[in-house]
Amino acid sequence: MSENNDKKIVTRFAPSPTGFMHIGTMRTALFAYLWARKNNGTFILRIEDTDKEREVAGAIEHIQESLKWLGLEWDFGPDKNGPFGSCIQSQRLSIYKEYADKLVQKGLAYGDPYTKEETEAFRAQADAEKRPFLFRNHRPEKFENWDGTRPLRLKVSEIKRYKWHDVVRGDLEAGEEALDDFVIIKSDGFPTYNFAHIIDDHLMGVTHIMRGDEFISSTPKFLSLYDALEIPYPIFATLPPILRDDKTKKLSKRDGAKDILDYREDGFLPQAMINFLALTGWNPGTPQEFFTKEELIKTFELTKIQKAGALFNETKLLWLNHEHIKLIPKDKLLEIFKGIITSYNGTVISDEALGKMMPVLLERVQKFGDLKEMLSNGEIEYFFAKPTYKKEGLVWKDESGFENTKQYLTKALNAFEKIALNDWNAEALKNSIWDYATEKGRGAVLWPIRYALTGKEKSPDSFIVGSIIGKIETVERLKYAISLL
Ligand code: GLU
């Protein structure tokens, strides 16, 4: 059975509330979202909380917060019921029960009559005989009335080879060994994932299922259940795993995979994050790498999702983030910077000073977290405080000597002092000394000036720094340097 193609496209993101939003999980959400939006379809957020033991308090809020941060708004979700009812599985138990009863009535499901120990003994016996353990080999001959206290198992009625199509992986198939009488309702009354997701996808009108490759091996079981329930198959799109740097394994928590909201904490932009996630496993087929959300919605194609594992490339994430930061309007950026650096060692930094520093900071900031770090590691301390250094540092590659260096700095001091306060800018500073520096050697002249202002081997050039710290401060710093020599 295949799905009618004229139907409105419906996708869903169906996380379990376990408290951790892995970037791979968020990528699944993004792809499902993009496909729905591209087709003017519906995107559903469904909470799969049928495993009460794994559930973590606050996880549902965490899921919603993560999606909201990325700007992946849902049409129906835990906060908004659909025409099909709640989007939280634990609130849909009567629906699963109804479907389970139908299967029981049709003789397609039965209460598991065995104790845990008995099942274990079957398994041990199969192991000893070196054959796979299949519950269906122990299926009871007569099904007792199911009273709901025993796990309910599906009777896999057609033991056959299953073939199915996956938009990403192509034609897939699996043999009888993948089929078994699996549990659909547990003894606590909750459905299993295998059962609940199929009913929900059906009732919610889901047309496309996007999920990780760990579900491929279970697909024959799902198909046997679709058949038993007489539900048409949706379209399957298996997303590639996200691999850690050395490509040998899936990126896991242990390899430093972070929760998505940790990236927010670290000063990544949501628009950069979705740009990055989209490129992790999907390829537009052009060299374009920078995408806005709107461009992604327009360009996204299921057929361009790659089969092979996608590398988690943090360098690319940083680069993309920087590119997205650069697009933020200046006044908005100033607000963001102000939210991060308001003072240095107790001294309030004025908007004007921050505004002047912005271009310099912007070049160095890949994520906003870098700003804090630059402040705390002293990298840009010279903007706020006089530098401390040894006089040897002022001399360009030893060859200039103290005397020459003193002469260069004096020349610069005189030239800078002549610049009127109103004209004090990087251009004017540069013009006042450039010819002299060219004549005497740019390195020999410009190095000590810059060093006198910053006390650093590496920094923006002295004209920029001088223009930011102002005339009085520049003059004072040059005088101090001269006094050392
Ligand atoms: N609740 C499942 C999970 O979190 C969802 C899998 C699916 O999308 O079908 O892995």
Image (spheres, rainbow, N blue to C red):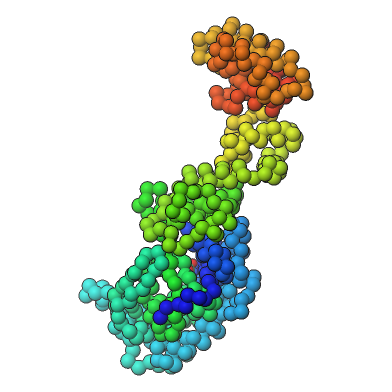
Question: In this image, 162 relative to 437: left or right?
Answer: left
Give me the residue at 47% from left, 58% from top. 24
Residue 87 sits in quarter: bottom right
Give me the residue at 62% from left, 44% from top. 327
325, above or below 6, in the image: above
Give me the residue at 74% from left, 17% from top. 419
Report the label total: 0
Question: In this image, 123 relative to 306: left or right?
Answer: left
Q: Residue furthest top?
A: 403
Q: Quadrant of the C terminus?
A: top right
172, above or below 95, in the image: above
Camera-side residue of 439 and 374: 439
1, above or below 422, in the image: below
Q: Position of residue 124 (x, y in %)?
A: 28, 75
Residue 326 sits in quarter: top right
Q: Position of residue 448 (x, y in %)?
A: 59, 16
Residue 397, visible in the rendered structure: yes
Camera-side residue of 97 and 148: 97
Q: Position of residue 365 (x, y in %)?
A: 58, 39
Residue 474 sits in quarter: top right
Camera-side residue of 204 and 92: 204
Camera-side residue of 196 and 300: 300
Q: Quadrant of the N terminus?
A: bottom left
Question: In this image, 157 relative to 469: left or right?
Answer: left
Give me the residue at 62% from left, 31% from top. 380
Q: Position of residue 101 (x, y in %)?
A: 48, 89
Residue 395, visible in the rendered structure: no
